[in-house]
Amino acid sequence: MFSKLKTLVIAFLTLLLTLAIVSFPEQVLIASVHGLKVWWEIVFPSLLPFFIMAELLTSFGIVQFFGVLFEPVMRPLFNVRGVGSFAWILGMVSGFPSGAKITVLLRKKNEISRIEAERLLSFSNASSPLFIFGAIAVGFFQNVKLGVIIALNHYISNFLVGLIMKHYGRNKEEKRKKETFSFHRVFNRAFARMHRTRISETRPLGELVGDAVISSIQTLLMIGGFIILFSVFTSLLSATPFMFFVEFMFAPILHFFGIPSEVIPAFITGLFEITMGAEAISKVTSIPLVGQLMLISFILGFNGFSIQAQVASLIAKTDIRFYPFFFARLLHASLASFFTYVTYKLYFDQRMDIVDAMNPMLTFPQFVLVFVDFVKHYGPIITISSIGFGVLLLLRRIKA
């Protein structure tokens, strides 16, 4: 009975979305072009190098080397094997969904168990500093100081999510024996693990690099499709009466927290797509700045349904379950929003010059702006060149 009802609901929603696309062709075209532009200029050229290097570092055993080294840190903190440090760090540096991509890669190579993969996935999928400082703080608010409070609470909350999720699935794991720590012994074991991994890799270097490029491009094409799809979906929410229904549903909840109804459309947009939502929230002047920052921190921690759909697609061919990740997103969003309010009221509200004493943070945004400008100018060239190279590799494999 439930299976038939599920089929009926999926068919109805798909038909409804199709009718909406046909009814609003102009809005759909504009939204599609916007989503394509974001992927074409920013996402693809920014993430491609990280994805390729993640594949190569794993194949050469370097990830396994650092995994053994970081085992004494990752195991007590997050109850995850040391190789998880690679997904955690790279996920923060390059942003969503890099952490999910690397977690899936580690699981497919059996470097981590299913429970460990679900724990790791819960805190390795964070926003990048480039997006927080470059897009939100500088781009939307024209105030780099706001990037400090958003980033600080985003990463602290993400760390706390990892600490909380370490208890997930403990009753399903075998107890491990505690070992005395010796750096010399750990280093030798790490090197031996890296050497074994490299020796066991039978593919020649050219084939290995080619596989890394093809796999990375396929993943980024999938990500691009989701970006365009949710860009269209978010645009249709505003164009159809459905947004009024959603506003009616969420209004009592937001009013309970003192959030006016004017910000509801922007907040709902952010729940689906982070970039468009953050920009819309920054333009709502009827709420105080702390309210804007809380909402943006919430949607960053929540990841947005667009990012969550990308993660769901990445883990679909593994045994990793989605619901622990979704629970972690709700937890991350709530913690980040709460800490943003507390830190703003305690420090930022009374000291708007809080960042003036931090000289490194003043130069960091300049680097961000230069990098963003470089990606915007040369991103399309990098994208089309990489896709062309990937197509040539596939054609060569087919002919062989």
Image (tube, rainbow, N blue to C red):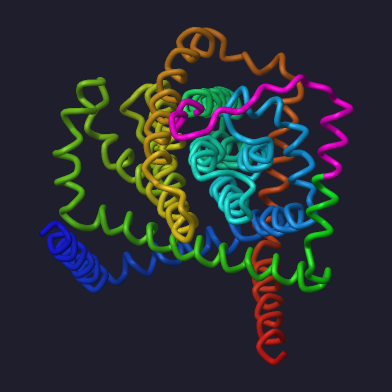
- Residue 277 rendering spot, x and y as whole percentages: 39, 43
Q: Examine the rendered structure and indicate whether residue 264 appears above or below residue 54.
A: above
Observer-nearest residue: 164 or 127? 164
The residue that appears at 43% across and 61% down in the rendered structure is: 226
Please count the marks in the image: 0
State the image quarter where residue 231 is shown: bottom left
Observer-nearest residue: 254 or 64? 64
Quadrant holding the N terminus: bottom left
Quadrant holding the C terminus: bottom right
The reply, left or right, for residue 234 in relation to residue 87 is left
- Residue 107 rendering spot, x and y as whole percentages: 58, 51
The reply, left or right, for residue 379 in relation to residue 267 is right
Is 188 one of the magenta-colored residues? Answer: yes
- Residue 43 rendering spot, x and y as whole percentages: 58, 56
- Residue 103 rendering spot, x and y as whole percentages: 58, 47
* Residue lying furthest left: 1
State the image quarter where residue 392 is shown: bottom right
Q: Does residue 126 appear anywhere in the picture?
A: no
The residue that appears at 75% across and 57% down in the rendered structure is: 59
State which region is magenta: 166-192
The residue that appears at 73% across and 39% down in the rendered structure is: 67
Is 40 one of the magenta-colored residues? Answer: no
Q: Does residue 50 appear anywhere in the picture?
A: yes
The residue that appears at 42% across and 21% down in the rendered structure is: 290
Observer-nearest residue: 362 or 312? 312
Observer-nearest residue: 46 or 353? 46
The reply, left or right, for residue 152 in relation to residue 60 is left
Q: Examine the rendered structure and indicate whether residue 212 appears above or below residue 338.
A: below
